[in-house]
Image (spheres, grey):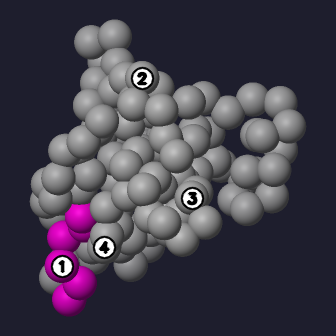
Amino acid sequence: MIDAGTLRHVATFLSPPPAGGTQDSFGRPVGAFTVQFTTRASIEDLSGRELLVAQQLQADVTHKVRARWRPGVKASWRVQVTRGGVTQTFELAEPPRDTDGGVRVAMEFFAREVIPG
């Protein structure tokens, strides 16, 4: 179960450009991400024990994101949030996890901040 009061941020979920197009030197598709949906979410900076656990998954994980369950969200997507007048973009570090034991009410995933430039 997810407490609606903790979902303080408006989050826009973005899917990557289609495969088969132009790629950068790392083989990632180049182009604009497409808005899939906007929903309320909780974006938390990781610290302490939770940060250590997340970094065992991927070393550059910096945040945990929680939102209501939406089918079809993939690990290649991004999430964009404006907090305190600053827009931040996060890459999913993993596919979303169902946090309600199969009921699919809420999803949670670790993410890393994308630094523009």
Dot 2 surroundings within 10 Å: few (below 14), some, or many (20 or more)? few
How far apart, in angstroms, are the residues tagged by discs 4 and 3? 17 Å
Residue 91 screen position, x and y as percent:
43, 53
- Give the labeled residue for mark 4: 72
How far apart, in angstroms, are the residues tagged by discs 4 and 1? 15 Å
Name the front one of labels 4 and 3.
3
Say left or right for 63 vs 15: right
Dot 4 surroundings within 10 Å: few (below 14), some, or many (20 or more)? few
Residue 62 screen position, x and y as percent:
61, 39
How far apart, in angstroms, are the residues tagged by discs 2 and 3? 17 Å
**Which residue is at 58% across, 57% downward?**
99
Residue 107 screen position, x and y as percent:
47, 55
How far apart, in angstroms, are the residues tagged by discs 3 and 1? 31 Å
Instruction: Indicate the amino acid at tag 4.
Output: Gly
Q: Relative to residue 12, is residue 94 depicted above or below?
A: below
Q: Is residue 115 magenta?
A: no
Q: What numbered label is drawn on residue 5?
A: 2
**Which residue is at 39% across, 31% downward?**
4
Instruction: Indicate the amino acid at tag 1.
Output: Pro
How far apart, in angstroms, are the residues tagged by discs 1 and 2? 35 Å
